[in-house]
Image (spheres, rainbow, N blue to C red):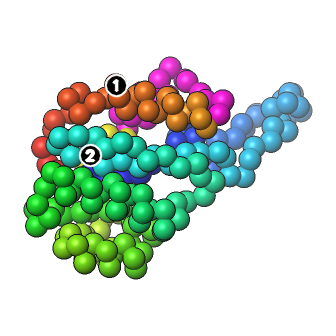
């Protein structure tokens, strides 16, 4: 399994609708009414590959917007996914199922997977919004719960990265639910 996730300084479930809605604007305190937020909040991209034997060393990238195709290709496909495949599996036994992010189906990614005989689900045959198929989403849910446990918030991206690294070590491959790994 290979995927990436963005983490913000604090957990937010519905990023486009997290405003404060008062019943009477006249009684709302000015510090609440006029609280400014950044258009693109600081976030960190975490990319990992999980096999039945290991969780790869995470790749971290400070981001303001979506991951660039070159970064995804170099750090996630070549360094992450292919390293895991060549270390633990036969290529012919692998079916890579990327999500629908544009960088996952870029020309250089598709060409590289073809040249290296890695089977993958083409974009037009890939289900959208189906976490039951993409079992790594269970992993991200567990990690997110651990990182933001009891309302924890980071003050800086570096603090958030240290917290994620610590929680990844706590999960470990032995503690990861075997029902998820059974299907990979």
Residue 76 visible, this orientation:
yes
How many marks the image carries: the answer is 2
**Residue appearing at x 19%, y 73% in the figure:** 117
Give the CA separation, mark 1 to mark 2: 15 Å
Residue 136 seen in render: no
| Residue 15 vertical position relative to residue 71 in the rendered view, above or below | above
The numbered dot on residue 170 is 1
- Residue 146 vs residue 66: left or right? left
Q: Earlier in the sequence, mark 1 or mark 2?
A: 2
Residue lying at 80% horizontally and 42% vertically, measured from the top left: 36
Q: Which residues are magenta?
A: 141-156
Circle 1 residues within 10 Å: few <14, some 14–19, many ≥20:
some
Q: What SS does tag 2 mark?
A: loop
- Residue 172, image quadrant: top left
Cβ atoms under marks 1 and 2 closer than 8 Å:
no
Which numbered tag is attached to residue 50?
2
**Residue closest to the far top:** 150
Helix, strand, or loop for circle 1?
A: helix
């Amino acid at each position: 399994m290979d995927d990436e996730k963005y983490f913000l300084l604090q957990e937010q479930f519905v990023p486009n609708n997290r405003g404060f809605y008062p019943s009477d604007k006249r009684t709302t305190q000015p510090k609440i009414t006029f609280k400014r937020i950044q258009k693109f909040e600081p976030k960190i991209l975490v990319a990992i590959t999980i096999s039945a034997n290991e969780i790869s060393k995470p790749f971290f990238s400070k981001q303001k917007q979506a991951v660039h195709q070159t970064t995804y290709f170099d750090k996630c496909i070549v360094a992450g996914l292919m390293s895991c495949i060549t270390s633990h599996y036969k290529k012919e036994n692998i079916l890579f199922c990327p999500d629908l992010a544009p960088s996952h189906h870029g020309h250089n990614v598709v060409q590289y997977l073809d040249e290296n005989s890695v089977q993958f689900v083409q974009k037009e045959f890939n289900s959208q919004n189906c976490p039951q198929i993409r079992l790594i989403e269970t992993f991200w849910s567990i990690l997110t719960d651990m990182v933001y446990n009891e309302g924890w918030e980071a003050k800086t991206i570096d603090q958030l990265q240290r917290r994620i690294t610590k929680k990844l070590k706590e999960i470990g491959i032995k503690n990861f639910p075997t029902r998820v790994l059974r299907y990979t």
